[in-house]
Amino acid sequence: MSSKTNPVTNFLAGGVGGACTVIVGHPFDTVKVRLQTMPKPKPGEVVPFKGTFDCFRQTVAKEGFFALYKGMAAPLIGVSPLFAVYFAGCSVGRWLQQTHPGQEMTFLQNFNAGALAGVFTTIIMVPGERIKCLLQVQQNAAPGTPNKYAGPMDVARQLYKEGGIRSIYRGTGATLLRDIPASGAYLSTYEYLKKALAPAGSDGTQLSPMRVLFAGGIAGIANWSVCIPADVLKSRLQTAPEGKYPDGIRGVFREIIREEGPRALFKGFVPVMLRAFPANAACFFGFEMAMEGFKMLGL
C-alpha cells in the first residue's frame, strides 16, 4: 500500500496538519464569525463593525489580544481529529478509484476523493463548529449582559438541555452543502499544484517547504472560494436562538436575501481569504512533514 492510500499514516499526519491550521487561523476565524453573525442595524443605530480590520481592532481593544482565540479549545480538540479523518478519507477515496497499486490520480479523481472525505468529516465537525460559533459571538450581546456560556463544555451541556442531540448537531445539512464541494476543491487543487511546482524530472513528491506552503495556501483559497455562501448560512443557523429557523437553512437563506440582499452571503469574505492562505499553508506543511517523518521510520 502506497503512502497516499495508507489510512493510518494519513490519519496521523492529518492530525498534525489540523493542529497547525487552528493555531495559525483561529484569529481570522473569530473575526469572520463575528462579521457573519453581526445583526443588521436598525434605523439610527451604528453598525457594530465597519469591516474586517475594525473588527480586529475593536476585539483587541475591548477584550484583549487573546479574545481572538476565544472558542479555540473546541476546534483544536475537534479539528485535529477532523483533519485526521479528512486525510484518511482522502486515502480511502483514492484507494476506491485505483485500478492498480500506485496509480496516479487525475484532477477529477482527487476531487472525488476530497469530496468523499468531506462527508466523513461532518459528524466530527458540526458539534465543534456550533460550539465555536456560539462562543465567538456571545461578546456581541448588549453591554453589561453576562456571558451565557462559561466555556465549550458548558455550551454543549446547555445545548443538550435545550434541544437534545439535534440541537448540538444543528447545521449538519448546511455543513454538508459547504464541505462536499469545498473539500473536493481543496485536495484536487493541492495535488495539481504539487505536480505543477515539482522540479522537472522528479516524481512530484519532493517539494521544498516554500512550494508546499504555496500549494497549501492556494488550496485553502480554492476551498473557501467555493464554500463561503454556505458558510454564512451555517454560521447564522448555528448561532440563532432555538426555534428561530424551523425549516433550517432555507429559512436562513430567505431571511438574508429579503433583509440584506445577496451580498450578505459573502460577509466575512476578507477575513476568510486572509486566513485561508496561512492557515492551510500551515496545514499542508504540517501534514507533509509528518508524512516524511513516517517514511523515515519506515511506516
Image (cartoon, rainbow, N blue to C red):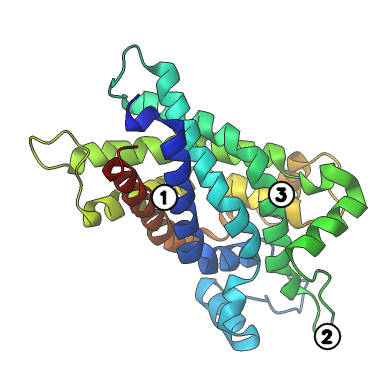
Q: Which residue is mark 1?
A: 220
Res 97 quadrant in image: top left
In the displayed orientation, state which residue is furthest to the bottom.
61
**Tag 2's secondary structure?**
loop
Mark 3 residue element: helix
Front position in the image: 25 or 142: 25
- Image quadrant where one finds the C terminus: top left
Q: Residue at x 64, y 67 (%)?
A: 34
Locate residue 213, reporting x and y percent: 30, 55
Q: CA distance from mark 3 to mark 2?
A: 28 Å
Image vertical order of residue 142 relative to residue 212, above or below? below
Mark 3 against mark 2, which lies toward the viewer?
A: 3
Which of 88/234 is in front?
A: 88
Residue type at mark 2 is Gly
How busy is the neighbourhood of tag 1: few (under 14 within 10 Å), some, or many (20 plus)?
many
Three-letter code for the amino acid on which mark 3 is drawn:
Pro
| Residue at the disc numbered 2 | 144
Label placed on residue 48? none
Q: Is residue 241 visible?
A: no
Going from N to C along the chain, the mark reached first, 1 or 2, is 2
Residue 252: x %, y % from top left: 74, 47
Question: Is 112 on the left or on the right of 140, as rendered?
Answer: left
Q: What residue sits right under mark 3 in the picture?
A: 127
Q: Residue at x 68, y 46 (%)?
A: 126
